[in-house]
Image (cartoon, grey):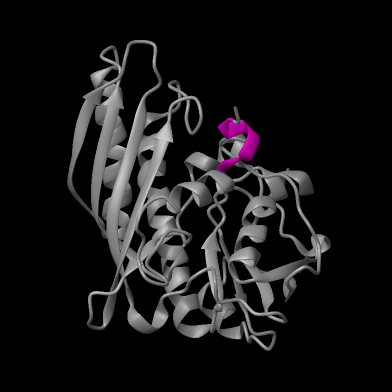
Amino acid sequence: MRTLADIGEDALIARLVSLAPTGNAGEGPGDDCAVVDEGGEMLRLLKTDALVEGVHFLRNADPKAVGWKAVARVISDFAAMGGTGEHFLVTLALPGTMEIAWIEDFYRGMGECLALYGGRLAGGETCRVPEGSAAVISIAATGSVARGNAVMRSGGKPGDAIWVTGRLGGSLVGKHLSFFPRVEEGRWIAANLRPTAMMDLSDGLAMDLPRLAKSSGCGFRLMREAIPISEGCLLDQALGDGEDFELLFTAPPDLDVIGWREMFPGLELTRIGELVPEGQGDSLAGGWDHFG
């Protein structure tokens, strides 16, 4: 009998979403957030995300940093759509031996992130897991994006340039607990740079770039020598560490980035390749797969 490890995360998701009703084009699974059109000038964004002890954090990690990360991951997905987060629901599945002080500091970290990015705690749920089981934290949230500024993964075209913000690699040595979601940057990109597709880098460039290209019905050609690498890291780490939470997007090849440099002088924006027709271009292996 086949197992999750046999097929991997992406294939699992593709099988599961075929078993239930989904939304219209742009509303169903497959992007950083689900998009719901309720009419009016704003589109509703929906997102859920989970952290598992031993996978996304260790018990001896700073609980405030873990709380920050739990919310910031979700906010980063809103940023990848050109939007912002608004109302957040938190589900805690914890062993009864969990220290109260750890949980309180976790909430303090969440609160600091919500306060900085304008989100609000709206409610949640608590339940117990068997002793010896890992703690599980799930965040669900709503957000919004201006109707004309929503950016999906599926709009890229052959010839589009591929861009990335910031530098990649280093999450495994602590960066995954100290990142800042690119909310202002994502909104500015959506409004000013004519992006055709966009996502955040959560599972590593080696995993996420092929996902974006596939969603757009394209292949890709990567300029490895151009990839911006975090200080002290190697190319393999920039490709595969994951949890960079930078923005990866495509845009017409004549993109003018002078405005970006004026608006965000402290953050690099680097062209790292181009989209090509489906079936052509490069391939990548690596990155994070929960079941691979």
Q: Main secondary structure of the magenta part?
A: helix
Q: Position of residue 118 (x, y in %)?
A: 26, 60
Residue positioned 62% across, 39% down in the render = 7
Q: Is residue 20 left or right of residue 32?
A: left
Question: Relative to 265, does residue 50 appear above or below in the rendering?
Answer: above
- Residue drawn 36% across and 24% down? 135
Q: Extreme front residue here?
A: 1
Q: Who's the residue at 47% across and 61% down the image?
A: 31
Task: Give the image location of residue 251, x and y in percent.
Answer: 61, 80
Q: Is residue 151 above or below residue 55?
A: below
**Residue beneath the point at 57% across and 48% down:** 10
Q: Is residue 78 left or right of residue 284?
A: left
Q: Quadrant of residue 32?
A: bottom left
Depth check: give the residue in front, 51 or 34: 34
Q: Is residue 278 left or right of residue 288?
A: right
Image: magenta residue range: 3-9
Percent coordinates x, y for residue 25 in the rendering:
42, 72
Can you say which quadrant of the picture contains the N terminus?
A: top right
Let me know if residue 243 appears in the view. Answer: no
The quadrant in which the C terminus is found is top right
Residue 179 position, x and y percent, is 49, 49
* Residue 213, visible in the rendered structure: yes
Q: Quadrant of residue 81?
A: bottom left
